[in-house]
Amino acid sequence: MIGSAPRRVETYLRERLAGGPIHFTLIDPDKSPGPAAAHVAAAAVRAGTDAILLGGSTGITPDGMGAAATAVKGAVQAPAIIFPEGPGSLAREADAVLFMSLLNSRRLDLVVRAHARAAPLVRRLGLEPIPLGYLVIAPGMRVGEVGEVDAIPRDDPAAAVGYALAAEYLGMRFVYLEAGSGAPAPVPTPIVRAVREALSIPLIVGGGIRTAREAAALLDAGAHALVTGTIAEEEGVGAAFRDILREVVRRRAR
Ligand code: 1GP
């Protein structure tokens, strides 16, 4: 039969995006297991975040992911979306999974082969796959190393545009520009601006966002969505997190 399963989470994200920029809070179930993940998620949603991404480190088990997803879903209405490290991160308790190709990896496994192994499991678990092109910009941090990427140089918007457009033309429905978790600075705004001008699918930007000023610059350059992880991990959902959220929320349609 031609047709696809309902895309509930993607539809929710698109509805939110119709009102302006959105924010994802990334929680690492290894560092914030079960109840701790729920605690962060609840505070993040109160501050205005739109969805919870679960993932971000190596060594996450399906049980750990499942426990975090269950706890988060018990605490908030926002969707719990797996940000996978590999097939071992998948758990049926989550709502969806970023089904992402690491576009600029030298490892074919991370571009498509692991996906071929994971896809039947995604189907069996009933997880909604969200097709996404994931592009690492220098410095890339740990994901850049583990992912064996040819990182996009920070002064080369044209290279980023090429990959991002290729992702769109291949049918992916989101592009994620990643500077790497804990990066000393976010993705440069000229890259964000150039990619946004070329793309007609939503653009997610993450890695190294620690201040409201950085968030504002990325949003003004055209990011549709921001991802933050480290800030809440290190400081909890405190003033810095709320200041970043304020920049997102105030750009939404009133
Ligand atoms: C990492 O883009 C995310 O994959 C978030 O990065 O931890 O630096 O906020 P930070």
Image: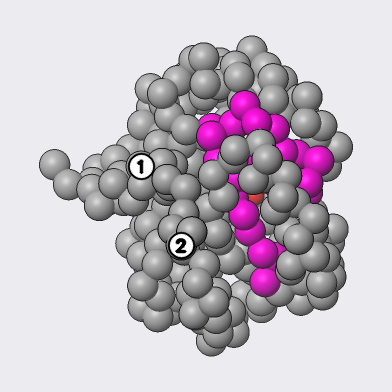
Q: Amino acid at mark 1?
A: Tyr
Q: Nearer the viewer, mark 1 or mark 2?
A: 2
Spot occupied by residue 94 in the image (x, y as percentages of width and height): 59, 31
The reply, left or right, for residue 204 in relation to residue 84 is: left
Task: Check contact, mark 1 vs mark 2: CB within 8 A.
Answer: no
| Magenta-drawn segment | 80-103
User: Please, which residue is most extreme toward the left here?
Assistant: 254
Q: Which mark is residue 12?
A: 1
Q: Is residue 169 visible?
A: yes
Query: Is residue 98 on the magenta stretch?
Result: yes
Say which residue label 2 marks. 2
Give SS at disc 1: helix
Q: Quadrant of the C terminus?
A: top left
* Rendered position, 128 above or below 49: below
- What number of labels is visible? 2
Q: Is residue 27 visible?
A: no
* Rendered position, 147 above or below 35: below
Crowding near pointer 2: few (<14 within 10 Å), some, many (20+)? few
Identified at 80% across, 65% down, the residue is 113
Crowding near pointer 1: few (<14 within 10 Å), some, many (20+)? some
